[in-house]
Image: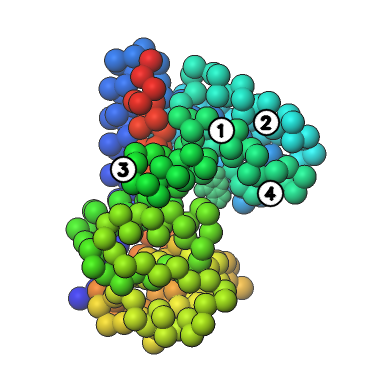
């Protein structure tokens, strides 16, 4: 029997816990946990993501402030806004939506976010803390995946985990989190030799390549756990992941669907991160 890992349900549970935590925090401190979302430019997908993040924050009782800057905003102005938010007592978590326009140095902007207000866990100080095994906010998608693993009591200790994709947002932090849970981790990318064979040896697959149905059924070992980060739109308008779900589900012991798997966990985990940052800052 293959377990379908329900991210929608897990995210709902996380949001309910965050809502309770927000109420308790507000009761105790007289202010709600605060999230500031910064969007630069007019990328339509980013506009939807940021709107959804703000809506979700409000729904669980957070103070939510949205800054939408024009695409041609000078880098200095983006940095000035981030520094202003660092000083704003109502704000516990800052999120600068990526990608930023080309003339803005992403590394500089991320480094300017106070590590104690880094809702995404992208600041180099927090990336360092993660790799050292220290408490830190962690990137929402990979952290959300570990929440799914916990929810379904999947212990990765000793597993041969294969992550496909080495991005700063998913692949790298996922590797740190799985290593911390005592998996043996291989991070693959576009230049990995004999990639299908590497995937075939995996007890756990994290697919984060951004290519529809890249992982085919024959690449999935019998009994493997499959976590699909991809969201791809097919020509007929339907969504699919980086894994051929139907074929993979025949062999996997557990698998996330798309939609309704990893996707919903990202925003829920962001909210959990903001509450944790608020509790650490206190009043
Ligand atoms: N762009 C794509 N994913 C993310 C994310 O998790 N956080 C931010 N800030 N930007 C993104």
Residue to which mark 3 is pinned: 14
For label 1, the SS is loop
Residue to which mark 4 is pinned: 43
Residue 115 at x, y = what percent?
Answer: 48, 33
Residue 94 at x, y = what percent?
Answer: 52, 32
Mark 3 burial class by Cα count in 10 Å: few <14, some 14-19, many 20+:
many
Name, please, the residue furthest toward the front: 132
Q: Confirm or deny contact between disc 2 and disc 1 (CB under 8 A).
A: no
Distance in Å between CA atoms under marks 3 and 4: 28 Å
For label 2, the SS is helix
Residue to which mark 2 is pinned: 79
Q: Confirm or deny contact between disc 1 and disc 4 (CB under 8 A).
A: no
Q: Can you see residue 7?
A: no
Counting residues from the start of the chain, the first of labels 1 and 4 encountered is: 4
56 or 178, nearer to the observer: 178
Residue to which mark 1 is pinned: 113
- Residue displayed at 40% across by 50% down: 131
Distance in Å between CA atoms under marks 4 and 2: 20 Å
Q: Confirm or deny contact between disc 1 and disc 3 (CB under 8 A).
A: no
Whether the residue carrying mark 4 lies under 8 Å from ligand 1 is answered with: no
Q: Quadrant of the C terminus?
A: top left
Q: Can you see residue 261?
A: yes
Marks 1, 4: nearer the viewer: 1
| Residue 22: image tag | none
259 up-or-down from 51: above or below: below
Distance in Å between CA atoms under marks 1 and 4: 22 Å
- Residue displayed at 74% across by 31% down: 76
For label 4, the SS is loop
């Amino acid at each position: 029997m293959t377990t379908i890992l329900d991210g929608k349900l897990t995210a709902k549970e996380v949001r309910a816990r965050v809502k309770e935590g927000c109420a308790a925090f507000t009761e105790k401190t007289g202010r709600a946990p605060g999230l500031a979302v910064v969007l630069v430019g007019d990328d339509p997908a980013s506009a939807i993501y940021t709107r959804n993040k703000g809506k979700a924050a409000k729904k669980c009782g957070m103070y939510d402030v949205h800054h939408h800057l024009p695409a041609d905003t000078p880098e200095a102005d983006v940095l000035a806004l981030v520094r202003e938010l660092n000083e704003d007592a109502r704000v516990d978590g800052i999120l600068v939506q990526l990608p930023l326009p080309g003339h803005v140095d992403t590394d500089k902007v991320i480094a300017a976010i106070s590590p104690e207000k880094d809702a995404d866990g992208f600041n180099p100080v927090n990336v360092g803390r993660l790799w050292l095994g220290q408490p830190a906010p962690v990137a929402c998608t990979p952290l959300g995946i570990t929440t799914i693993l916990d929810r379904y009591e999947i212990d990765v200790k000793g597993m041969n985990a294969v992550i496909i994709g080495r991005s700063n947002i998913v692949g790298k932090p996922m590797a740190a989190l799985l290593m911390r849970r005592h998996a043996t981790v291989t991070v693959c990318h576009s230049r990995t030799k004999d990639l299908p064979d590497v995937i075939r040896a995996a007890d756990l697959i994290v697919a984060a390549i951004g290519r529809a149905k890249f992982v085919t059924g024959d690449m999935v070992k019998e009994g493997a756990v499959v976590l699909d980060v991809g969201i791809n739109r097919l020509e007929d308008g339907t969504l699919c992941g980086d894994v051929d779900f139907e074929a993979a589900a025949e062999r996997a012991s557990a698998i996330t669907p798309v939609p309704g798997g990893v996707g919903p966990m990202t925003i829920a985990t962001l909210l959990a991160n903001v509450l944790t940052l608020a509790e650490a800052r206190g009043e």
